[in-house]
Image: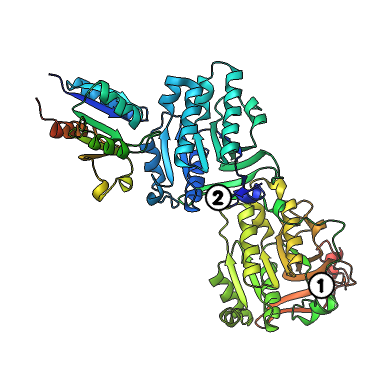
Amino acid sequence: MTQSVLIVDDEFGLADITADLLRDAGYDVRLAINGKLGLDSLVEHPAHLVLTDLMMPVMDGPEMIRRMRADPRFAAIPAVLMTALPEAIPHGEHALHDAVLIKPFSLAEVLAIVRRLLPPA
Amino acid sequence: MTRIETGIPGLDTILNGGLFKGGVYIIEGPPGSGKTILGNQVCFHRAAAGDSTIYITLLAESHTRMIAHLRTMEFFRPELIASAIYYISAFKVLEESGLDGLLKSLQEAVHQRKAAFVVLDGLVSAEEFAPTARAYKKFIHELQTISSMTGCTVLLLSSTERAAGFRPEHTMVDGLIELGDTVVGVQSLRHVVVRKLRGTRQLRGRHAMEVSSAGIKIRPRIETLLHLPDEDDPAPRQMAQANFGVIGLDAMLRGGLPGGSNTIVLGPSGSGKTMLGLQFLSAGVREDQIGLYFGFYERPASLLAKGVRLGLGLEAARERGVLHLLWEPPIESGLDAVVERVLRAVVDRRVTRLCFDGLHGFRHHAEYPERTRAVFSAFAAELTRLGVTTLFTLETGEIVSAGIAIPIDGVSALADNILLLRHVELRSQLYRLISILKVRDRAYDGAIREFQITDRGVVVADTFDSAEQILTGAARTITDPESQR
């Protein structure tokens, strides 16, 4: 079965390139532009991994991950926070993500993280 | 109406106090003119002041890259990001749901984050996505409604790659600030112009703008800041005369220069202008009048050495804190920066005597030489207002010349007093001469006298004894029969 990845980012550019890369690597990729639309997407199209930006309109990344963890349907999905601002990453009990990608990241870094969190089925 | 400070040095001054809370302002300029830095700098300032701010981009430029650039700026405070400064991109929203979607998203973000300040970077994209000109105007109008209802101040950053001139949105917003970059000679000069400002009067015209790691700094044109002389001004208060401590010269001046006046000392290179200035300051410090020497050419160390040779006691005065020496290298720092620096030193150090050595250097600092006269006028008037007696030196061209050409147009008419120093050749010897061309509202001795620089300071002798010495400086003697043939 093809593994699927959801990328949530309000920004044009990096998300699209990351999506192309992951598609080339054989993943099924969906995109959403904020946390709320990301959660909506998970309901309709379950994903095996979520990559989400930190700051976004409507619902930010940490809030989306918090809601995923609170929902038995999505609680086990690994989530990666992507940000250009390591200072803004939640710490301690608020850190519900599984990994962090500091922007700008290389495509090799994304692939490495995705492969680590999503071993080939 | 409440004002909010932008925190950009100089900008609030030219905005006459800042932006109006709940106003919508356009910042326009070509790529690279500093719009993004300006928008971010204001966000950081507002965030530090306790406002919730949002920086929305409509451009393809990524936040990642922008933040990487911002990290090099001194105003960047990462702890404010995500809490008080929120970066979001609305490009996709705009692409997918147009201007209505953008407005909705903006309104939600302002509401959700209780934002008091928003920057929308990339107004051009909004215009590109507008199906008609009317739809675009409607968008600006709706934006204004949101801002006035929520009290959230909005800056719209717009690139002027497209056709210049007045555009419909200009008439709608509360203010229009233009950033520019012009090449004058070999210098590239940034500037800012407030084209429009509702509800208050801005300082009009171009003001110099600097971008450094400290962020943006605007230097309001000094002549627009200072009080310009006006016919209704009260007569200047009477102040004690400022003597030179040189018997012959003080006698010519009937005691000294009028207190609080400004004097131009004209003369060619090497005629003793700087010496006379140091002598003037030295006479002041003897009476505990605080002196400031400001020059472009001689560094403090070499001036002090000069003072030692003349026995002026400058070193001791400097140690006592009654004499200050400032040096400005003659590079591109701009007139406004020079004047601001001198006036600040005058106020901070309670200076009452100033020697400004090199009005000609001042001219080299003028990006637009035609400004020199206006700046000089405002500067001199401000010094008088501050009760400072000032000596401005001004170099004339020829070393030994029959004529006097004043190198800066119109400046001499603005000076209260003019002293003229010259070299005169006489029997293969060079002499220095001093004469007074003008003392405002006061009688003086207009005779020409010999001026010497000795190890006891400046000495002005009796009237030069050759009767043929005339103001043109071409001296000759009739007692020598050889020269009559």
Residue B109, quarter of picture: top left
The mark nearer the N terminus, 1 or 2, is 2
In the rendered structure, the answer to whether residue B104 lies left or right of residue B196 reads left
Q: Name the residue furthest left.
A: A121
In the rendered structure, the answer to whether residue B79 lies left or right of residue B204 reads left
Residue B437, quarter of picture: bottom right
User: Which residue shows up at 23% across the image and 37% down it?
Assistant: A69
**Which is nearer the eye, A59 or B480?**
A59
Q: Which mark is residue B258?
A: 1
Q: How is the image coloured?
A: rainbow
- Residue pointed to by mark 2: B8
Please name the amino acid that badge 1 sits on: Pro
At label 2, counting other C-alpha atoms closer than 10 Å, the crowd grade (few under 14, some 14-19, many 20 or more) is some
Please name the amino acid that badge 2 sits on: Ile
Disc 2 sits on a residue from what chain? B
Identify the secondary structure beneath mark 2.
Answer: loop
User: Which residue shows up at 29% across the image and 25% down it?
Assistant: A17
Identify the secondary structure beneath mark 1.
Answer: loop
For the C terminus of chain A, give its image quadrant.
top left
**Which is nearer the eye, B300 or A110?**
A110
Viewer-nearest of discs 1 and 2? 2
**Residue B184 sits above or below residue B396 on the image:** above
Residue A110, quarter of picture: top left
Q: Position of residue B3 (x, y in %)?
A: 62, 48
Q: Position of residue A63 (x, y in %)?
A: 32, 38
Q: Position of residue B300 (x, y in %)?
A: 56, 70
